[in-house]
Image: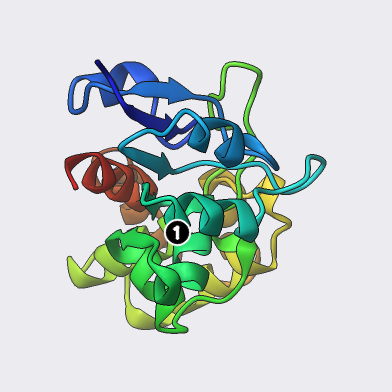
Amino acid sequence: RVNIFIFTGPTLRPEAGRKILDAIYLPPVSQGDVYRVAVKKPFAIGIIDGYFDRVPAVWHKEILWAIAHRIHVFGAASMGALRAAELAPFGMHGIGWIYEAFRDGVLEDDDEVAVVHDEAYAPLSEAMVNIRRTLEKAEGQGVITPLTRSALTDSAKRIFYPERTYPYILKLGRQSGVPSRELSQLVQWLPDGRVDQKFEDAVALLHA
């Protein structure tokens, strides 16, 4: 009997998750959902994606209630990473680079993991944390210089999260005087080079 519940959405499709872990996959978590699942007394609950804007976000107290009832609660990638960073001292299990960055204070803003998506949970914008990791990788591979990485990262951070896309970031780069040669190299590199840190952390949660 499957006794693990995973809240996911734009970060990790359920069909991809099932190839790794046999679990019950639910839509992004919102207020009250963890409690409703916890009363079923599952072995574990995994939180990846969650609502936070127009829908009340998952309560800290309901996660703590689940932990108090000896249910393993894991968090990674998105809302899960935020809550795990806050509740790690109380027994929530955080997984992945994004969780560690929030736990250690390297990242602080909720908008780092926020995206907009359609009704089928297909993302329509790019998470800031993915952009950071992608530009760091591009710099590390010599595609762009440290100066360009910094300029593009700053431009991306200033964009309201629903509008963050690579074409828009590159457009702002051109307008701010980033060398066209580097932008051209980045455009060619992005399709195969871009980092989806949220997805990688979500996969790590399922393995954990």
For label 1, count other residues whose C-alpha is less than 10 Å away and answer few (under 14), some (14-19) or many (20+).
Answer: many
Most extreme residue toward the front, as rendered? Answer: 69
What secondary structure is marked by label 1?
helix
The residue shown at (77%, 47%) is 53
Left or right of 129, for residue 156:
right
Residue 65: % across, % down: 55, 54
Could you tell me if residue 170 is visible in this image? no
The residue shown at (78%, 40%) is 55
Could you tell me if residue 47 is visible in this image? yes
Dot 1 amino acid type: Ala
The residue shown at (44%, 71%) is 90
Residue 76: % across, % down: 38, 53
Residue 169: % across, % down: 57, 55
Most extreme residue toward the right, as rendered? Answer: 54
Closer to us: 17 or 91: 91
Left or right of 52, for residue 9:
left
Q: How many marks?
A: 1
Residue 167, above or below 10: below
Closer to us: 14 or 165: 14
Residue 38: % across, % down: 50, 37
Residue occupied by mark 1: 81
Residue 174, above or below 41: below
- Quarter of the rendering occupied by the N terminus: top left
The residue shown at (73%, 56%) is 160
Left or right of 12, for residue 80:
right
Left or right of 191, for residue 164:
right
Closer to us: 85 or 182: 85
